[in-house]
Image (cartoon, rainbow, N blue to C red):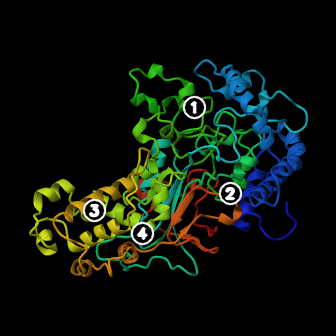
Amino acid sequence: MSTDDESFHPLGDEWEDELETMLDDTEYDSDLGMEMAQDAMRVTKGELSEAEFHEKHHEAVMEEFGEDERPTKEAYEAAQEEAKGTASRMLGAFDGDGEETRRETMKKMGVGAAAVGMGAFSSTRDGPMESLSAEGGHSETTEHSDTQWGMTIDLERCDGCLTCMSACTQENDLDAGVNWMYVMAWEDELHEGHEEGTDTGVYSSDFNMGSDFNMLVRPCQHCTDAPCEKVCPTTARHTRDKDGLVLTDYDVCIGCRYCQVACPYGVNYFQWDEPHTDYEDIPKAQDRDVDSPDEITHAQYEHGERWVDSRAPRGVMSKCTMCPSMQDGQQGEEKVGTSACESACPPNAIQFGNVKDEKSDPSQHREHPSKSRAVIRLSDEHTDASKGVPSPETIDETLSSDDDIESALEKFENLDQETLSIMKAIELVSDRTEPGDEENNSILRKEQEIVASVDAFEQYVDLETDEAITQLQLGDGSERQARFRIQQYTGKPNSFKLLEDVGTHPNVTYLGEQPGPEAEQVEGPTKYEDIGLVDKRQDLLDEETVGGVDGVSL
């Protein structure tokens, strides 16, 4: 541990003390866990190299756990090809009889859980262990992959309904209080909380910005350089090469909880007791796609050789997974590039997809937030605004060349001047990029639909005359003025990532106000108990989980 009085953990002294107390209740070395967590964050900040980190703690990890499966970059690159073949073949020997997990099978063979990891099949035992990594194993970055799943979350669109949390709980069969994401209202010295009797903040009479609370939605950030992975002695916590998801192999995790200490975001959960839903009773995603459940194999559910999805067994760490069964196509191709929380969010505050694809929804929302907000608003079938956007076909059937703006608007039941103004503004700022065939490029697709409607409208009514531009409140009709008009309609949100200075490179971007260092959780617009959720696991067990209202900073 550091000898100075300053906390190394971004969540502060109180949180750090709670973590140390938590480690004291385990069978593993608390000091080692705290020291490794501190050094893992030094690595992400560039203050310590991966090799120095591995060497510094190798002897202590070997003494404590009997193995040190933490892979270095050099070891990973050297062993990768061999691992893809050898590790997969070796893992096949531990499939069990269909009623046991690999953990149980290995225990019967006399292999302690602490000694189990992908590197157990390494070809060398000299010096620092060279960890073998099958597909889905450790990766320092995903620079060689074109896919990195992530999110852009619009906090000013979040209305605090907690539907995303309910959807996550249902999708993953989580027990009460095992919340893999949190939706919290907060306040600090610069941002006051909700006051009774205040109206919802809006930027125009038609655009609902969500809640008048300050909101924060906190799932796992699926960091490109995840410190939780660096401290895992068994490689249970790992990053998938193909898509950058940071996952936990439940069969390999020994529950040391070092990852919980090393996570700067406080999003890990330890499964204290037996889950309410038995493993055998969890509906397999593939049940929807095959004629007989007997066709489903244990390996299919585990996404290859690793059990990384749904709720964890007792004594194992878990967290948000960003729905790997969806990303792997096991729930149908239409679910690839989506997540349970995104699909369930009523105000479309969550945009999930490939953050490396500039055409994807999270990328578009991150880079063009005001325009994307307007597109989402005009395209959301649950809003009155969307009902006012006619299709090109409807426009052709309705308008004639004798129409002007007033007469044209009178011919549509729901199209008003403000909606037409925003449609034209979107057309002026659009570069008409085609959405392509990738998953979750719906914002660009909807944008092109709006542009097509404007093009059809202008076949009958000239919207670029000085009179029309003035009537639509588009200034001088320039792209700059169009952007300003959209910002009047949707606002111009800040964009930030949580704890960027830690150097973890999180793959969740936020739009809206960022909590300050003294921010504290306050009661939000929807109470957890009102929709069958539990905010604090300690309400059911005499243990704590993340997300309480005890003053811990956000």
| Mark linked to residue 504 | 2
Work out whether residue 395 can be spotted: yes
Inspect the image, locate mark 4, and give the three-letter code of the amino acid beneath it. Ser
Distance between mark 3 and mark 1 Cα atoms = 40 Å
Instruction: Identify which residue is drawn at 88% across, 50% down.
Output: 56
Q: Position of residue 388 (x, y in %)?
A: 21, 64
Residue matched to label 3: 383
Instruction: Identify which residue is drawn at 88% across, 31% down.
Output: 125
Q: Are marks 4 and 3 in contact (CB under 8 Å)?
A: no
The residue mark sitting in front, 4 or 3, is: 4
Q: Nearer the viewer, residue 154 or 77?
A: 77
Crowd class of label 3 (few under 14; some 14 to 19; many from 20; radius 10 Å)? some
Quadrant containing the C terminus in the rendered view:
bottom right
Establish if 98 lies above or below 43: above
Work out whether residue 117 can be spotted: no
Inspect the image, locate mark 2, and give the three-letter code of the amino acid beneath it. Thr
Residue matched to label 4: 370
Crowd class of label 2 (few under 14; some 14 to 19; many from 20; radius 10 Å)? many
Secondary structure under badge 3?
loop
Instruction: Identify which residue is drawn at 68% across, 19% down.
Output: 93
The residue mark sitting in front, 4 or 2, is: 4
Distance between mark 2 and mark 3 Cα atoms = 38 Å
Inspect the image, locate mark 3, and give the three-letter code of the amino acid beneath it. Thr
Occupied quadrant, residue 377? bottom left
Q: Are marks 3 and 1 in contact (CB under 8 Å)?
A: no
